[in-house]
Amino acid sequence: MEADFIAAIQELIKETARDESANLRLAAEIVAKALDQDRLIHLFGTGHSRLLAEEGFFRAGGLACINPVVIHELSLLMDPLLATAAERDVTVAARVFTRYRISPGDVMIVFSNSGVNAVPVEVARGARLLGAHVIAVASRRYMSQASSNHPDGLKLGDLADVLIDNHGVPGDAVLQIPGLPTRVGPASTIVGALILHAVLAGAVSRSVARGIAPPVYMSSKLPGADEHNAAIAARYRHRVAALEPTARG
């Protein structure tokens, strides 16, 4: 069964690479243009998609202009049942825009496997209204089968400049074990992380080709990394909320 799970993940990655190449390129170019203008790349998700907002932050080989948008009321570690209810409450999205600075030309990448919860949808809409570009990562199949709980009936795909399909199955879990009625083996965060880093790597390569060197962190274990990372973090200390403790959500 261990090999079955790995095989299922490999198939999802294969499908993503094959079918999403155009969307990955489009997303990478959107992010690259933001990098060229020294804009911020905001990452947002609820539930376990929140992990992807943190995945891109302060990462070896990652961009310093990543701003993880984290609302503690939506954290599963605070209270998973309340957090699950909160992600369906459209009013919670307003807290994103009171706690985080989102400006024209920025990019908001929203992760939502189902693509139908009210808060991710409303964050995408609010970011668009503020002039940010919106990239969505979701399962098209899941989104097509699930009902929106946004009050206007919107789904994440309705608000994205580009939607990247993670090719996940409805319910996320990819394995059916005989004798167990519930499927196991969630896949969305694995494929989501792959999509995120593919887009960011593609964006950096495009900016470098245009003569711009985006700010990239080094592993703290490498020689000179502490000085390098401190210098570029200082550039964003008053723009990236997680680098500015008083502004955290």
Image: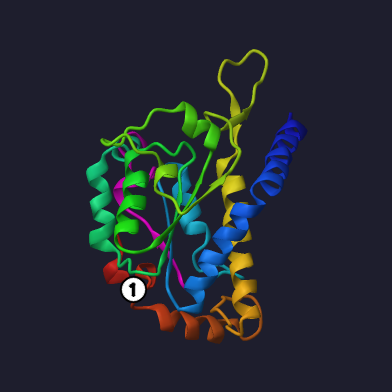
Q: Position of residue 191 (x, y in %)?
A: 61, 46
* Nearer-the-camera pick, 240 or 165: 165
Instruction: Say if 165 sits above or below 26 in the image.
Output: above
Quarter location, residue 205: bottom right
Give the residue at x 51% y 65%: 30
Position of 249 relative to 151 (above/below): below
32 relative position to 83: left or right: right
The residue depicted at 26 percent of the width and 42 percent of the height is 90
**In which quadrant will I find the N terminus?**
top right
Dividing the picture into quadrants, the one containing residue 166 is top right
Q: Which residue is mark 1?
A: 244
Residue 146, image x, y percentages:
44, 28
Q: Amino acid at mark 1?
A: Glu
Give the image location of residue 228, x and y in percent. 55, 85
- Nearest the viewer among 199 and 130 is 130
Q: Is residue 125 left or right of residue 224?
A: left
Q: Is residue 219 visible?
A: no
The magenta segment: 64-83
Instruction: Decide if residue 68 is on the left or right side of residue 74.
Output: right
Above or below, 39 against 181 in this view is: below
Count how many numbered circles sit on residues in the image: 1
Residue at 34%, 33% in the rendered image: 81
Secondary structure, mark 1, is loop
**Where's residue 132, x and y in %?**
37, 63
